[in-house]
Image: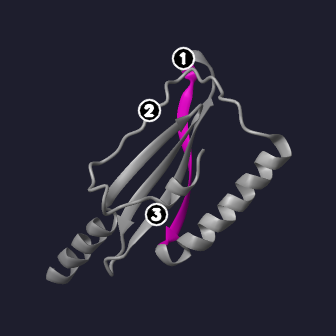
Amino acid sequence: MDVEKRKNEIEKKDNEIIYSKAIKAGKRIYYLDVKKSRNEDLYLAITESKKKVVGSDEDAQITYEKHKIFLYKEDFDKFTEGLGDVLNFIKREQGEATQREYKETVTTETTPVDETKSKSFFDKFKF
């Protein structure tokens, strides 16, 4: 019983979000969650959640389609470099993006964290 209890505690800790940011964009929400692995390393879990409405009016059913990417610190530099390259290509080909108007308001949610200790690798980009 103690082994199973310890396993459950480890899994619960494994799923704990240390820092989070939600980015609402139309029918999509992007979640950037910093989590801690079993060996105490921090990693980034990126989740795209897309609202799907099936049916109409009274019979409408709402579901959410989710896709996740896990990014570990040893890959941050390569990912950042690749993302920057791709974003710069798109900007060169199509110019700067114009701000879209969404019916929903854009908000972000964050968990308080010591800013001197955690800088996001996304801070290098201007989205």
Earlier-in-chain disc, 2 versus 1: 1
Q: Quadrant of the N terminus?
A: bottom left
Taking the spot 37% from the left edge, 40% from the top edge, the residue there is 109
Q: Spatial distance from mark 2 to mark 1, Cα to Cα?
A: 28 Å
- Does residue 71 show up magenta in the picture? yes
* Residue labelled with disc 1: 58
Residue at 71%, 53% (x, y): give it.
Answer: 87
Question: Which of the two discs, 3 and 2, labels the residue nearer the N terminus?
Answer: 3
Q: Assign the magenta stretch its main secondary structure.
A: strand
Q: Going by the image, does 62 lie left or right of 109?
A: right
Q: Which residues make up the magenta segment? A: 59-72
**Amino acid identity at mark 1:** Glu
| Cα–Cα span, label 3 and label 2 | 20 Å
Question: Is residue 25 on the magenta stretch?
Answer: no
Which disc number belongs to residue 122? none
First along the sequence among labels 1 and 3: 3
Mark 1 vs mark 3: in front: 3
> Number of numbered discs present?
3
Where is 18 relative to 65, above or below?
below
Compare residues 9 and 16 and report the one nearer the observer: 16
Q: Residue at x 20, y 83 (%)?
A: 3
Kindly identify which residue carries mark 2.
107
Q: Three-letter amino acid code at disc 2?
A: Thr
Would you identify the image quadrant in which residue 15 lies?
Answer: bottom left
Q: Nearer the viewer, mark 2 or mark 1?
A: 2
For disc 2, the neighbor class at 10 Å (few under 14, some 14 to 19, many from 20) is few
Q: Quadrant of the C terminus?
A: top right
The residue that mark 3 highlights is: 44
Which residue corresponds to the image point at 66% horizontal and 60% vertical from the top-left? 83
